[in-house]
Amino acid sequence: MTSPQETTADHDVVVIGAGFAGLYAVHRANERGHRVLGIEAAHGPGGTWYWNRYPGARCDVESLDYSYSFDEQLQQEWRWSERYATQPEILRYIEHVADRFDLRRHYRFGERVLAASFDEASAQWTVRTDAGTVATTRHLICATGSLSAPHRPDIPGLDDFEGDVLMTANWPHEGVDLTGRRVAVIGTGSSGVQSVPLLAEQAESLVVFQRSPNFSVPAFNRSIPDDEYAEALRTYAERRAKSWASTAGSPHVGYDREALDLTPEERRAVFDEWWQRGGVLFAKAFPRQTIDPEINDLAREYAAEQVRSRVHDAQVAEDLIPNDHPIGTKRICTDSGYFETFNRDNVSLVNLRREPIETFVKWGAKTATSSYEFDTLVLATGFDALTGALTRMDVRGTDGVTMAERWADGPLTLLGLSVPGFPNLYNISGAGSPSVLANMVLTAEQHVDWVLDLIAHLDERGFRAAEAREDAAVAWTKHVDEVANGTLFTKANSWYMGANIEGKARGFIPYIGGFKTYIDHCESVRDGGYRGYVLSS
């Protein structure tokens, strides 16, 4: 790592972030001969997998797919141990990539970007960090992550609680021993669903405060036998080709017959098959499952039956079954024994819709009808998703307006990559792109390659800057809205809609038209001479 005094030199590209997208951007930019600097708040590479070290943290995309595709030797040399890798294994993989391609030397680790501003006269960005580093660059790639701005809820009295407060999104790296502790968890999204079974095994008692139950499908995780792994390596090219041509960046294609054309027995067999495939893949059982309410109701009732069969207490089971959104319109969680955990004698569930928290006190929490004492509080309360990482920084474009101000009424982007008024700034896997609705490793590769092609286009033709045109960004954002409104996704108060953050503009944030369709849009813009951009010298 270089010293702060050496960072004021001009750069061609500055990359914020050292997760999957950031590392790839630094690698590719360096490969193309650019003077590149990476800046990362963490003390090492990993992105979300550096911070999210809570018990049970695991990816819900299969390891063979949730990995880089750009280097065949890398694909062949790495051995994933499980179908769905845990956080430690994913972090080891990312660290291996950083070392294999010698990427750490380009980074300033342990520095958080506080501000970035664009100067029109020089067509350069000036980036400032909390360590006092000032870096100038022509192009700013924001690989800041879709789920990287933790949300701490504003609950009355929370600061009065005298016990330990932990956040799943920033779990202590040294781990936490909860043996004999009385633990409470707030939040039942992915991190809550994944951590609760393991917390229950350690804690003397565990109370789960649930506002909104989520659908969850078992991971059915397993180790990958050597012969199966060898076959996967042999056919990797075919697997990747299917992923690049798919709607979500994975090789799994759902059943091709309409659910309503089948007998109940045939339909149940399909649901059984896709349930056994595990996790988010259940949403792919039938075409139009998240479009047609009748088909969705069939899938929802099937999932509800699964909960009832796993939870002994009938009232607890009903409390754990969502009734406020179509299945799949909030991200289906992937669990390992979550529902069965509520059969344990040391675990209890508090339905906050029936029994809301009134205030925290030094020894626990008081609800409308009861009180709960605990020593440790775990906040599994999610993120200011897709926009929070950028809006929490002081990023200012041509007119001095911040990104937070520009997006006050919702994110406006062209292809999710560029924002009017912010020339030469590129947002990777953010609002207006497939991002969290697709395999984010492949979407990062696609985004970065497209951005670097645009930079090459500018350099070859003597242009200094590329800026999204206002009307083109309005048209793309309207398209994002229209596609979402043709589905059931807008029926859920989800973080996809910004609904988990008070005061955040409501609207479906990612692009739901499909990964391959999105790629086609990007290629059309490129082939049209970067139609929708103003290229200036």
Image (spheres, helix red, strand yellow):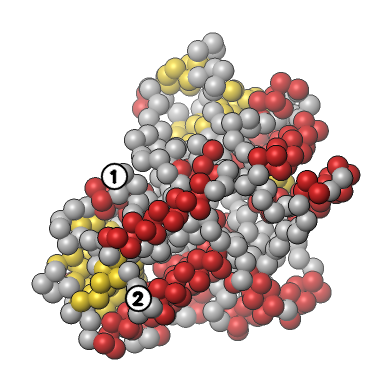
Q: Secondary structure at mark 1?
A: loop
State the image coordinates of residue 4 (x, y, percent, origin top left).
22, 69
- The residue lying at 37 percent from left, 30 percent from top is 154
Q: Is residue 165 visible?
A: yes
The residue pinned by badge 2 equals 530
Most extreme residue toward the left, as rendered? 121
> Residue most toward the top?
369
Q: Quadrant of residue 26?
A: bottom left
In the picture provided, is 448 more to the left or to the right than 279?
left
Residue 515's image quarter?
A: bottom right
Q: Is residue 173 above or below residue 498?
A: below
- List x then y, in percent, for residue 163: 45, 28
Which residue, given by chain and number where applicable, does mark 1 sit on? Answer: 408
Q: Quadrant of the N terminus?
A: bottom left
Residue 41 image offset from top left, x and y in percent: 35, 58
Q: Residues within 10 Å of mark 2 (few under 14, many from 20)?
A: some
The amino acid on which the numbered mark 1 sits, given as a three-letter code, is: Ala
Query: Residue 136: x, y in percent?
Result: 20, 71
Q: Viewer-proximal residue, 351 or 515?
A: 515
Check the image and report above or below for 456 versus 20.
Answer: below
Residue at screen point 41% across, 33% down: 153
Say if residue 167 shows up in the picture: no
- As measured in the structure, the alpha-carbon distance from the residue carrying label 1 to the one carrying label 2 is 27 Å
